[in-house]
Image: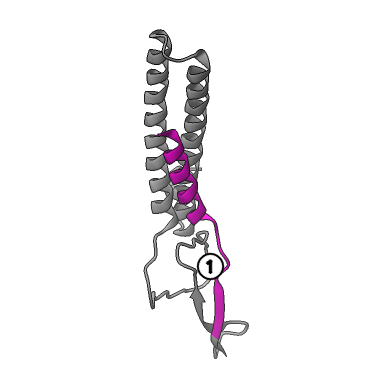
Amino acid sequence: MIKRILILSILLTGTLVAQEAKVTPLLSKDLRGLPGKEGLMITVDHAPGATDAIRRHNAHVFVYILEGSVVDQLNAAEQSVDVAELGLTLARQEVERARRHFESGVATNIEVITAQSDLARADDNRIQALYRFNQARADLARSNGHAEDTYGH
């Protein structure tokens, strides 16, 4: 059962890797009465499952989703925490199963040690997922200009 969770975690992590977006400029126009300012229209195409870091632009930005849908970084990080917590629960159950088998003489201590090692790895995965989730929360607050309101000084 541990292998399935690790594979699921690897697959989920694989979709979180940033992929190059295709940026196509459509229009660029200097803004009258605003020296050094321009209006820019572009399209950005992302591959299916691709993610992009939250950004803050020192400009007014209007975004329209022309095709597909967007899953934000925070939702993906939250799903990663859920998967990591499930992996941790299953790893704990595996340690208990291995201990019972060892105590009944059905297995050696190697099975128990392996299960404990897998439990430690699952706990590390959960800690990393929680870190990424909190980082995504902070990035979102910062991009919205609410970092100080949310996290103080």
Q: Position of residue 107 (x, y in %)?
A: 45, 15
Location of residue 109 in the rendering, given as x and y in whole percent from the top left corner: 51, 13
Of residues 60 and 111, the one drawn nearer to the viewer in this rendering: 111
Q: Is residue 37 visible?
A: yes
Residue depicted at x 37% and y 30%:
89
Residue at left offset 49%, top offset 36%: 125
Which amino acid lies under the numbered mark 1 shown in the image of this protein? His
Against 87, is 51 above or below? Answer: below
Up/down of 31 relative to 45, above or below: below
Check the picture and name the quadrant holding the N terminus: top left
Image quadrant of residue 24?
bottom right
Residue drawn at 62 percent across, 82 percent down: 36
Q: Which residue is mark 1?
A: 57
- Please give the range of residues in magenta: 1-25
Q: Main secondary structure of the magenta part?
A: helix
Q: Locate residue 37 relative to residue 85 in the image: left or right.
A: right
Dot 1, how many residues are within 10 Å of its Cα: few (below 14), some (14-19), or many (20+)?
few
Task: Estimate the x, y position of residue 126 in percent, counting from the top left.
Answer: 46, 35
Residue 83 on the magenta segment:
no
Question: Does dot 1 land on a helix, a strand or a loop?
Answer: loop
Residue toward you, 34 or 76: 76
Q: Residue at x 38, y 76 (%)?
A: 67
Examine the structure image and report whether residue 23 is included in the region drawn in magenta: yes
